[in-house]
Image (spheres, rainbow, N blue to C red):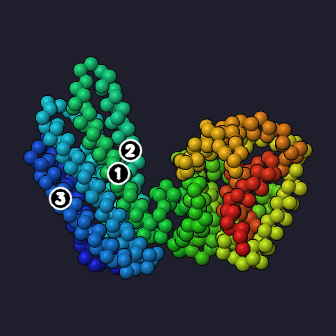
Amino acid sequence: MTSVLREDLGQDLAMMARLVQSQLIRGMTAFFQRDARLAEQVTQKDDQVDNLLGLIEVKCFERIAGDEPNGVRSRQLRGVFRVALNLEKLGDYAVNIAEQAVHVSRLKARPIPFDLAGPARVALAALDEVITAFTDASADLAKHACRCELDLDRQYREALQETFRRLGQPHPDPAFVITNLFVAKFLERIGDSILNIGETTLFILTGERLKLHQYLHLEQVAGTVAPHAEGALDFRQIWGGISGARVGMVAVGQSEPLIWKEGDERKIDEEIREMEAWNRIVPGLVPDVKARHREDGRLSFLGQFLRGSLLRDVYITRGWEEKVRATRRLLETVRDIWSATLVKEAPRIDYARQIRDRLPELFALHPKLESLRGGESRVFGIAHGSLADLLERAADLEASLAPPVSVRLHGDFNANNIVYDPEQDRVHFIDVHRSGHGDYLQDIGVLATSRPRAFRC
């Protein structure tokens, strides 16, 4: 980061940071002292902040244009621009507070209804710390500064509760109370921007865009597995998807890589439970969980790193022989699983409901198809009922079509959730939180339709 900041960008960013800090101090001072003239000075200086953002933006994009997109310098330049964007937001909040200072100066003087001085001190100290963290490339300072966001959130909630209490009393003076609440809200938003700057610093240092809670989760579980490991924590995102969870390869010092996954507590809990069940049936089929960390509704775990490629990538990029080899191994694995888990009990069939649940997303992407929902359609001159009617008829029939046996299913058996290791000639499953006993046709159907073009040679 220092190589970029040695250029004129460092001077511009430092000037912008000092100006924004001054604006926030003057804005809060104007509010506490009910000084409309000082507030006006804050408003007038806002153009300087905007101009500095424009200057930094031009310089960053000029330099990025000639750099390797995934290179360290490109990442640093993107970080500088993101910091400048958030500094500009902070400048806007200073103006917002100054505007409330003008408003409060016209009201009758009285004690502030809740603590604003404390949050202001927290915000200003954290801003100074996070700018230092960015310029010094300090992950520890960045993490410490980011924690102010939780404090400012809590203090805003307390101010909001006090506002409701006061507005419920006789003679509440709503204009005065709500003006102060606005300032509390702007301080809470200042915490959000400080968090963004801190997370940008972590992005530059790690090469991955992690939220603070994800970074802290990663440190906690890595420390559990390798408490005395030396060297930096190396993280690289893999297997990107749409589930909302973060999945990456992690190495601590010289240790072997591990898989890390972080997401919603309920989903990750389900996945860990199903992973343990799968490994009792076929040892090594899914990653073995080494450590886990739970906090604030989020859960993460470290597990065995699975070497190989997603089946999707095998089907799209590999030669015909490897496609056949991977498919043969997959089918043999599934056959063994079904043989070992088969029970003579008809599964619950609810395909019509599953289709109905997914229709809103389908129609959002393909609005022209929504006309099929309620009206009759013709295919090759043959009239067909509406989609709603067809689904209703299918729902009436599907229970009678259930097979007499159930087997253990993956639950989301698409080509993105299967890993093939050509060296060991074996397959692994990932993202198994929907696993359970059911109709074997469900997994077959999902696999067959997940990437239809990928099966072409």
Residue 285 coordinates in the image, percent (x, y): 77, 62
- Please give left or right for residue 286 compared with residue 71 in the image: right
Residue 166 coordinates in the image, percent (x, y): 30, 26
Residue 354 coordinates in the image, percent (x, y): 68, 43
Mark 3 and mark 1 lie on one chain; the one further toward the N terminus is 3
Q: Are marks 2 and 1 in contact (CB under 8 Å)?
A: yes
Q: Specify the farthest residue to the top.
A: 170
Q: How crowded is mark 1: few (under 14 residues within 10 Å), some or many (20 or more)?
A: many
Residue 250 sits above or below residue 7 on the image:
above
Mark 2 and mark 1 lie on one chain; the one further toward the N terminus is 2
Mark 2 and mark 3 lie on one chain; the one further toward the N terminus is 3
Say which quadrant the C terminus sits in.
Answer: bottom right
Q: Mark 2: which secondary structure?
A: helix
As measured in the structure, the alpha-carbon distance from the residue carrying label 3 to the one carrying label 1 is: 22 Å
Q: On residue 47, which mark appears?
A: 3
Q: Mark 1: which secondary structure?
A: helix
Q: Specify the farthest residue to the front.
A: 381
* Of residues 388 and 342, the one drawn nearer to the viewer in this rendering: 388
| Residue on which the image places disc 2 | 153
Q: Are marks 2 and 3 in contact (CB under 8 Å)?
A: no
Looking at the picture, which amino acid does disc 1 mark? Gly
| Residue on which the image places disc 1 | 191
